[in-house]
Structure formats: structure tokens, C-alpha cells
Amino acid sequence: MPDWTTNGFDEYAKRLPPESRIELKEIKPEQRSSGRNAERVMAAESSASKLPCRRTRA
């Protein structure tokens, strides 16, 4: 993951209340090739990024 991504995430996380816990998860990018258009690739990446959210109470 690029440094700018983790730096931006860390800065955002610092601004949240202490009881809010978030985690940055890297997903594998889809293979790009001439046989797959951008719409199909983005749709596949979108479905991979839809991870379950857990709500916790402090």
C-alpha cells in the first residue's frame, strides 16, 4: 500500500473519538487486461471491498 494511503488514514483516524475504532484493510486489485473493461474491473473490486461492518459498544 502506498505511504500516502496509510498516512492519510492515520491522520483521519486521529480525528475520530477514542471510542471509534477503525481498521484499514488492503484488498488485492483485480487483474487489468485488454479483455476486461474498466467497469467490470471496478465492479469486481467493489464487491471485494464490501466487508462486514461490526458495531461495538465501549
Image (cartoon, helix red, strand yellow):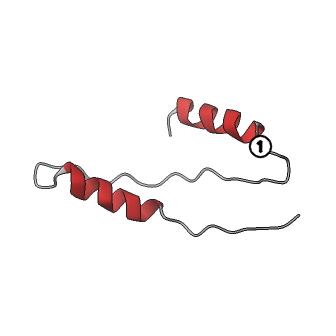
Q: Is residue 40 left or right of residue 30?
A: left
x and y percentages locating residue 11 in the rendered image? 69, 33
Name the residue beneath numbered marker 1: 16
Picture quadrant where residue 35 is located: bottom left
x and y percentages locating residue 26 in the rendered image? 52, 51
Picture quadrant where residue 21 is located: bottom right
Q: Is residue 11 above or below residue 34?
A: above
Question: Dividing the image into 4 quarters, which one contains the C terminus?
Answer: bottom right
Q: 2 or 22, which is in the foreground?
A: 22
Q: Is residue 47 left or right of residue 3?
A: left
Q: State the count of labels.
A: 1
Q: Is residue 9 above or below residue 54?
A: above
In the picture as drawn, the residue positioned furthest to the right comes out as: 58
Indicate the amino acid at tag 1: Leu
x and y percentages locating residue 14 in the rendered image? 76, 37
Q: Is residue 3 left or right of residue 35?
A: right
Q: Please tell me which residue is depicted at 68% across the width and 37% down the height of the picture.
A: 12
In the picture as drawn, the residue positioned furthest to the left comes out as: 35
x and y percentages locating residue 50 in the rendered image? 48, 64
Q: Please tell me which residue is depicted at 61% across the width and 50% down the height of the picture.
A: 24
Q: Please tell me which residue is depicted at 57% across the width and 53% down the height of the picture.
A: 25
Q: Secondary structure at mark 1?
A: loop
Quick one: label 1, few (<14), some, or many (20+) residues within 10 Å?
few
